[in-house]
Amino acid sequence: MSDMGWLRTAAIVGAILGGLVLIGVAFSAGDAVEGQSWSVSRIATDGELGPPLGGTIITATFENDAVGGIAGCNTYFGSYQVEGSHVAFDQLGSTLMFCDEPQGVMDQESAYLGLLQSATKFVVEKGQLKLIADDAVVVVYDRVEPALLDD
């Protein structure tokens, strides 16, 4: 076989293997969140990432294309779709309780649910899930064991 034949064969094999790797990444990205529970460690407020208000817990659990958790005061629920590193949240709803403590919890909750709906991409790395909107990280979660969320 000529040198050109070997190069052509190597290029074809490389393209096939590269395509298979990309397909694997697309499927494994969704698997990284499916069946997992998370707790918010940082949330965008006025364009800056910071911790949630003291005394509040914000969580997300992803199961069978459904997302739900605690938004600071109320529980929320909805659906999500993942394609590669892209994510879309849809049909988000929540219970309708009012919490007056800590001060600002209802504003934080509204902001959090809005950030979920604005997210278009996600990254999972080092035990954290980062939601991205407009090329900026807007929510950072730490992975938690589901049993810890029940306490």
Image: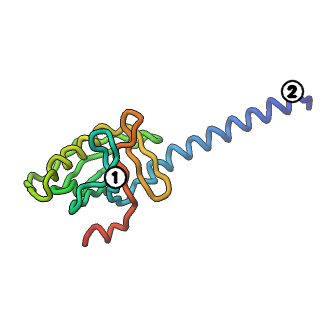
Residue closest to the far right:
2
Q: Residue at x 48, y 48 (%)?
A: 29
Q: Position of residue 51 (x, y in %)?
A: 31, 54
Residue beneath disc 1? 42
Q: Position of residue 101 (x, y in %)?
A: 11, 59
Q: CA distance from mark 1 to mark 2?
A: 54 Å
Tell me, yes or no, whether the two marked residues, 1 and 2, touch with CB atoms within 8 Å.
no
Label 1 CA crowd tier, 10 Å (few <14, some 14–19, many 20+): many
Q: Position of residue 79 (x, y in %)?
A: 28, 46
Quadrant (top left/top right/bottom left/bottom right) for the C terminus: bottom left
Instruction: Name the quadrant containing residue 12.
Output: top right
Q: Residue at x 32, y 45 (%)?
A: 80
Q: Is residue 17 left or right of residue 144?
A: right
Query: Is 148 situated above or below 62?
Result: below
Quadrant (top left/top right/bottom left/bottom right) for the N terminus: top right
Instruction: Name the quadrant containing residue 117.
Output: top left
Q: Residue at x 45, y 54 (%)?
A: 32
Judge whether residue 63 can be spotted in this image. no
Q: Is residue 128 left or right of residue 106?
A: right
Residue beneath disc 2? 4
Number of the front mark, 1 or 2: 1
Front-lying residue, 63 or 59 = 59
Q: Position of residue 22 (x, y in %)?
A: 58, 41
Q: Residue at x 20, y 56 (%)?
A: 72
Is disc 1 placed on a helix, strand or loop? strand
Q: What amino acid is at disc 1? A: Arg
Is disc 2 placed on a helix, strand or loop? helix
Q: Earlier in the sequence, mark 1 or mark 2?
A: 2
Label 2 CA crowd tier, 10 Å (few <14, some 14–19, many 20+): few
Front-lying residue, 38 or 11 = 38
Front-lying residue, 42 or 22 = 42
